[in-house]
Image (spheres, rainbow, N blue to C red):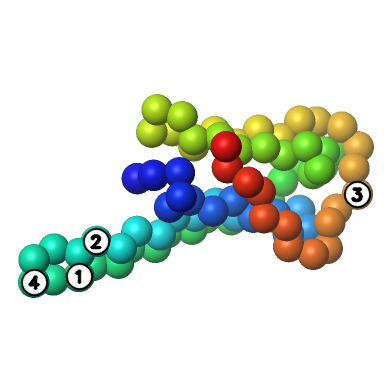
């Protein structure tokens, strides 16, 4: 998997992590899509959530603090 295959999105107190991969072989085509949604614990600073893809591992960090929930979906850039 590559960094571009992943998505991290925040909506309210829900963080969704997913990936989508399209594979093309000589005479066939396959598409895989997986996503998982987590409810964030109270007190997470939503504006400070960050993600990075390094050595095949997706790291998502969300620091503790006080912050109001965001109501609109917000895409987190993966570095």
Quarter of the rendering occupied by the N terminus: top left
Residue sitting at x 20%, y 64%: 24
Q: Nearer the viewer, residue 40 or 23?
A: 23
Disc 4 and disc 2 in contact, CB within 8 angstroms? no
In this rendering, the answer to whether 26 lies above or below 7 is below
Relative image position of residue 34 (x, y in whole percent):
42, 59
Q: Residues within 10 Å of mark 1 (few under 14, many from 20)?
A: few
Cα–Cα span, label 2 and label 1: 6 Å
Q: Residues within 10 Å of mark 2 (few under 14, many from 20)?
A: few
Disc 4 and disc 1 in contact, CB within 8 angstroms? no
Residue sitting at x 78%, y 58%: 12
Q: Residues within 10 Å of mark 3 (few under 14, many from 20)?
A: few
Cα–Cα span, label 3 and label 1: 44 Å
Q: What residue would you read off at disc 4?
A: 27
Tell me which label, 2 or 3, sits earlier in the chain: 2
Relative image position of residue 73 (x, y in whole percent):
73, 62
Q: Marks 4 and 3: which is nearer the front?
A: 4
* Left or right of 49 in this view: 35: left
Residue 15 appears in the rendering: no
Q: Marks 2 and 3: which is nearer the front?
A: 2
Residue sitting at x 72%, y 39%: 49
Q: What residue would you read off at disc 1?
A: 29
Tell me which label, 4 or 3, sits earlier in the chain: 4
Relative image position of residue 66 (x, y in whole percent):
91, 37
**Kind of element beneath mark 1:** strand
Disc 2 and disc 1 in contact, CB within 8 angstroms? yes
Q: What residue would you read off at disc 3?
A: 68
Cα–Cα span, label 2 and label 3: 40 Å
Q: Which mark is residue 67?
A: none
Residue sitting at x 67%, y 37%: 50
Cα–Cα span, label 4 and label 1: 7 Å
Tell me which label, 3 or 1, sits earlier in the chain: 1
């Amino acid at each position: 998997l590559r960094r571009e295959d992943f998505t991290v999105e925040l909506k309210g107190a829900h963080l969704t992590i997913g990936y989508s991969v399209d594979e093309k072989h000589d005479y066939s085509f396959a598409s895989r899509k997986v996503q998982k949604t987590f409810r964030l614990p109270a007190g997470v600073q939503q504006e400070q959530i960050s993600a990075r893809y390094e050595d095949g591992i997706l790291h998502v960090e969300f620091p503790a603090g006080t912050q109001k929930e965001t109501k609109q979906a917000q895409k987190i850039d993966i570095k």
